[in-house]
Amino acid sequence: MSDSASTSSNSAPRSSSYESYDYPDPPFRYQPFELRKLPNPPEGFRLRGKTPRVAVRDLMLKKKMVDEMVEYHFWGIDPGVLTRLTVLAKVKLLYKLVYHQAPEHRPKHMGQMVDAKMDAGPRLLSRSIHDPLPMPVSRFYPDMPSDTTPLRDDYVRPSDAEEDVPDTWLQQQLYSSRRQALNEGDESDESDGRVVPDRRAKRVAKRRAVQEAHPVHDDIPNYKVNDVGYPNYTIKDVVDAVEKAVFRFAYFDLDRHPTAAPLTPRPHIYATNVGDLLKAVIGSFPAIAYVNMSFDPMADAWIFGSGKKPYVYRGRGPVARENSSAVDCAIVVGRLLDAGSTVIDRKQPCWPKNFTNAEKAFIEATDLNWDICSPEISADQRDQLWMMLENAERSIGMGNINPLWNIWSACTGNFAQFRFEYAESVANCQCTAHGVTTEERYSSFVSASLNHGDAHGSTMQELVARYFAPTTEEDCDVCWEEKAVLRGKRFASLPLRMVVLCDDERVKNHTNDLTFTYADMDGHEKTAKYRWLGGVYYKNSHYRVVWTDAERGEYDSGAIRFYDGATNFGLIVGGVPPTHQNDRVPGGWMGEGIIPLLVYERVMDPDPSVLTLAKKSIEDMMGAQMQGQLILDAHAPWARSRYPRGILSQPWLRVLPERGQRFHTARVAHFPGEPSGRSPVSTFSDVIKRNQPTSQQAHGYMNPTLPQMPMSSPLNKVNRALSATRLRSRTPMSMLNSSAMASRRSSMMQVDSETQTNDPSSSPPASLAAWVTHACGPGGHRRPSAGEEAAEQHDTGRKKKTVRFGGAKSRSKATNGAQRAATRKSSRLSTQKRRSLEPSG
């Protein structure tokens, strides 16, 4: 450790040689950040157009001033050994420090570094640095944030932040690194970059007000780009959004096809009645974000509860059982690649007919919600796919240790993202007299095999470049003459994702990017680049998956994911640091060194026409603003979504059972925390009055719509009897307190004498059988109604009031019609009886 770094760790503040400056100098109480572990900046890196050598010459930097700058800006940072370093070497250290700082903290010129106006410390370093991880402390903020530190209302998590970095760290890293001057007429930072001499520095410093060492949060400008009505964003946010929008066209063929199983809820019901509006799509998702684990080399497995740092939870795969690891790993790799579900996989017309039943079953298996499956369901669903593969391929047997390639080829043989086409011409050796032969070939994999001259091994870069080389010379297999066979290849297409088979332990550096030259069908040589995604590794007759933990375009720190279906319910652990920059996978995980399957993804640029159109679009928007127009008023309206949501259906009849699906449709939505015994009531019921129930409403307290029954059914007899009873027996309100009416009231619906509405607390029976049993009794015989009991106890000539259960408005049309018909019949009978009693003369 350098002397300067060690002195910065003292407990007592030290006095600076900048006597005219009053800057914060708190003690540094943590392990200093080692700058030497970071790479040097590129040769062309400059500050305000000046290289370190030019800055020393033009700005007249002296040893004393440079030493003070290093002492100030390397607070909490170990610059290395400073003894006998020249001024130029120390300025290069400052340039290296500035190069690795975050863009919002990086000074624009050396003049901003000399006046101690800006902050200094590991907090200013870039968020893309992860090894080692800089702590969010600096001269302005010397203390680590606690887990209970509140987040500001205007805090927005940066898009380039790693998932395992807490928001409290990021918030402190985003605080401004500039101290605000009190006087508006102070010297601006936007000077010509010339370092002021000591006298001028003292004169400028006297005009600056002394500020606190630790400014209050609200007094320090945050990461806002503009404080006048614009949302919070950073330069990185804008750049990422533009690049992602442009690169979407480059990798459009690797997006999920609209007909693929949705990963988010997708509306799909065509509503035909008001009850359909209450239906909901319900799904289950894992609640785990991190796992506390560590890898035990003795057990050769990840163990819970003994980890010193949390690892990222990346989901789960199938749970292994009875030598199923080959099928398990194929499912996990297919899930990570959206195998069979991408746009290019389903691009051809009538594409479902091109897929075999085994491939359809494999796609369904990759779409299952393995994250929430129990071990039993997980193993059973995998066995369903395994059984289909056994029927489709004779070399596959359930319960056996199957070769991975047999499983993979049976599941993905017709998936276009892995296929490529080329024409191969061979000039054979003269001993065979075959001359030149040409053949068109299709393939879904690349064989990385070593030749006779590769006794000491070879890198994956060399083997793949040899496979795609426009021309190669080989030894004759007949007469063993060296370089007697000339082989040439012309490629009509390259795979978007390249599957490489490697069966030799002497292959090195397989996790590095691959770059090679190939010839197109016209013979023109081109260059292609692929990045390593992951692979399946073999150890002790067992397969595992190791995958990159960085998505496309993200900063790749080398971290990897690990899956083993035999442990931890098929957990996929993420954020595992690599063992080496060139070989990320630990040697202990590779077993015999044979890698059955590797996957690489092609690195592509957008088409030049896309960039041209993007540039023109930006220029048009800027032109509209310059003319004082609103962009949304001046632009051409955007097109609607290409595919309507919810209209697309399953492209084939399901092959595997329905268990383990990601979503299901329910009659009503699920609201956690509902009281037991009551179904949740949708807010839609607030719009419909409770005293107007209809057969189409599906409130929680209402019985479901009953099916149509014959007129002779017991329930219809009860309804007709009740209707007739209500017409001929009018029970007074005083009879509501009788035992008969109390029994009736407790069994059916309560009556609110003021509002005449139904009380949902006493819901009617929910099933048809319950209704029949309740109304007719266990034997199916009709029970006497309340009106009939009242009629037996009181004089029939006495005028009685009508008791209406549920209110007049709650009657259905059928009930009202029956009552009107009964009224007309009663009136007609009364007239006939009256006429029969009149004297005949």
Image (cartoon, rainbow, N blue to C red):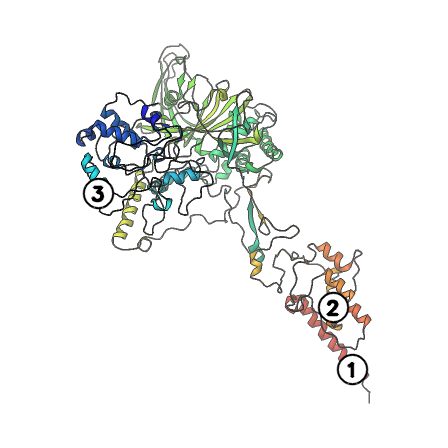
Q: Mark 3: give few (<14), some (14-19) or many (20+) Cα within 10 Å.
A: few
Residue found at the far bottom of this picture? 841
Q: Mark 3 or 1, which is nearer the eye?
A: 3
Of label 3 and label 1, which has the lower sequence position? Answer: 3
Q: The residue under label 1 is which amino acid type?
A: Arg
- Would you name the residue on which mark 1 appears? 834
Residue 322, image quadrant: top right
Q: Position of residue 100 (x, y in %)?
A: 32, 32
Residue 493 relative to residue 779: left or right: left
Q: Is residue 518 visible?
A: no
- Would you name the residue on which mark 2 appears? 736
Residue 183 relative to residue 710: left or right: left
- Would you name the residue on which mark 3 appears? 187
Badge 3 vs badge 2, beta-carbon distance below 8 Å: no
Q: The residue under label 2 is which amino acid type?
A: Leu
Q: Mark 2 or 1, which is nearer the eye?
A: 2
Q: Position of residue 511 (x, y in %)?
A: 42, 25
